[in-house]
Image: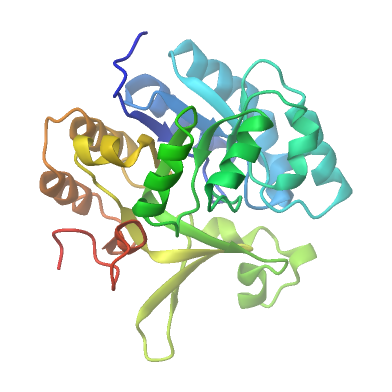
Amino acid sequence: MDRPENHIGLTLGPVLFNWSAERLRDFYATIADRSAFDRVHVGEVVCGKRMPFSDPVWPDIIAMLEDAGKEVVVSALALPATVRERKTIAALCEDDDRLVEINDVTALSQRGGKPFVVGPFVNVYNEGTVRLMASRGARTVCVPVELPLASLTSMAQSCPDIEFEVFAFGRLPLALSGRCYHARLHGLHKDSCRFICDQDPDGLDVETMDGQPFLAANGIQTLSHGVQAFCPAPEEAARAGVRRLRLSPHTVNMVAAGDTYRSLLDGRIEPAEALNRLRGLNLPGELVDGYERGLAGCLAAGQA
């Protein structure tokens, strides 16, 4: 379907948490049937140990999403640590049928110049890096979550042929580690973790020593405790060079979240109304957008 030049796309990012195969099937069936997302990412990004459980369900999920008219992007692991994981990424990068999201620069050579999406785990902070990625086949760049909107605007002006995407909703992916926080908390070793992270399907809240909400843990991943809620007016997003907004899956009503952002980007509701609707979704943390705004503090616009 042809879209106007200033149309801003809506992306559903990959599930970052350890959800069961049944939960993944049910979730994506709902997304395929009723959601406003035009692009949907699938695949394991955080922990390669989870892949044997989720890998068998992806072919059916991909077929279901594509039958519903969604563009599917297969996301690759962000911190490959074993030979098996590196071979899995290499095999994924050979796919000619759909876009692949690269979350680790070692996959660039394996993609071999075929089109790909640069994920938010890759350090893309300046125009030179964007041009390098574009020369290797990048079509979309989802910029790192800590990059302020002003920096993205500068890159978009210098690289007009690249589609820039912003992580707009969800707990922010901040870091990955060689150690598993969930396993250590439960007195387990990483190699015998019992996949205990499945007990926290939106991440495990982490507090400071004086009981203040601080971060969230997701296996080997550190997330923000707050939930990103970047809600720009469509003219603000277009002026900044944003061509896509990415929403990260949580156990809340993601169809409603997607509908809220689609209404915002189409100019049917104002940013304040979008924030009010998001607050009603029983989110795991407070709304934040400090990184995008480049302002002191972290409260989302209109919340202070």
Picture quadrant where residue 195 is located: bottom right
Quarter of the C terminus within the rendering: bottom left
Q: Is residue 149 left or right of residue 47?
A: left
Q: Report the residue that reaches farthest toward the top.
A: 1
- In this rendering, the answer to whether 5 lies above or below 177 is above
Residue 287's spot in the image, x, y percent?
27, 60
Q: Quadrant of residue 109?
A: top right
Tell me residue 171's x, y (percent). 41, 57
At x 33%, y 26%, the residue is 35
**In the rendered image, the vertical position of residue 155 relative to residue 303, given as above or below:** above
- Residue 72 visible at all: yes
Relative depth, front residue between 10 and 32: 10
**Residue nearest the observer in this picture, 198 or 120:** 120
User: Residue 191: which quarter of the image?
Assistant: bottom right
Residue 230: image location, x then y, percent: 29, 50
Quick one: quadrant of the N terminus? top left
Q: How is the image coloured?
A: rainbow
Q: Is residue 250 visible?
A: no
Residue 95 x/y as whole percent:
72, 21
Q: Residue furthest bottom?
A: 210
Q: Residue at x 29, y 16 (%)?
A: 4
Report the residue that reaches farthest toward the front. Answer: 158
Total labels: the figure holds 0
